Image (cartoon, rainbow, N blue to C red):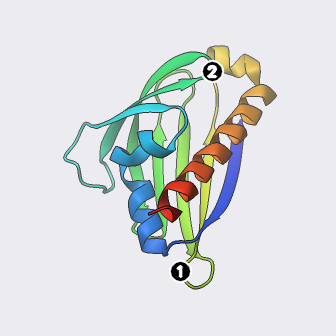
Amino acid sequence: MVDVVTTITVDRPRGQVSAYASDPANAPEWYVNIDSARWLTEPVLEEGSRVAFSARFLGRTLSYVYEIVAYNPSERLVMRTAEGPFPMETSYSWADAGPGATRMELRNTGQPRGFFRILGPVLELSMRKANTKDLQNLKRLLESR
C-alpha cells in the first residue's frame, strides 16, 4: 500500500487556490508528470464526473481515468481510478492558513500492481518527490499572478 501526503502554504485565498487546483484543464500546467487531461463527461466538477489523464511516471506513459467521488468546493476533492497498473485515490484539501493564505494537502493512496508493485519504497519516494514539485509549481504559478 502506498500513502503519500504532501502539503504547502500558498499566499492566495482558499477559493482561488481550490478553483485553480481542482480544474482538470490546469493539471498539465502545475503537475510535473501530467501531459493532458480530457473530460469524458460534461465539464462540470461533481460526483460522478470523469476525466482522462495521460502522464509519465518512472519512464512509463500512463493513461487512466479518474472519477470524482467527493467534491466540496474550497474544502475537499477526491478522485479515484481502478484502472491500470496503479489503482489510486487522489485527494486535495484546502484550509485557511492566515489572511489571504491557503494550506493545501495533496494525498495519493493506492495498491500498485505489476511493475509498480515490485518497486515498493522507490515508488513512494518518487511520488513524494513529484508531489512536492507539483505543489511548488502550483504555489509559484498562483503567487506570480
Question: Could you tell whether 22 is left or right of 117 in the image?
Answer: left
Callout 1 amino acid:
Gly
**What is the number of the mark on residue 145?**
none
Q: Quadrant of the N terminus?
A: top right
102 is higher (above) or lower (below) than 37: below
Q: Which one is in front in this view, the residue at disc 2 or the one at disc 1? A: 1
Residue 15 x, y percent position in the rendering: 42, 72
Q: Nearer the viewer, residue 89 or 135?
A: 135
Callout 2 amino acid:
Arg
- Mark yes or no: residue 70 visible: no
Q: Which residue is mark 1?
A: 100
| Image mark count | 2
Q: Which residue is mark 2?
A: 113
124 is higher (above) or lower (below) than 3: above
Q: Nearer the viewer, residue 28 or 128?
A: 28
User: Residue at left 46%, top 58%?
Assistant: 77
Alpha-carbon span between mark 2 and mark 1: 41 Å
Task: Name the outermost residue toward the left.
Answer: 42
Answer with mark 2 or mark 1, whichever residue precedes in sequence: 1
Element under disc 2: loop
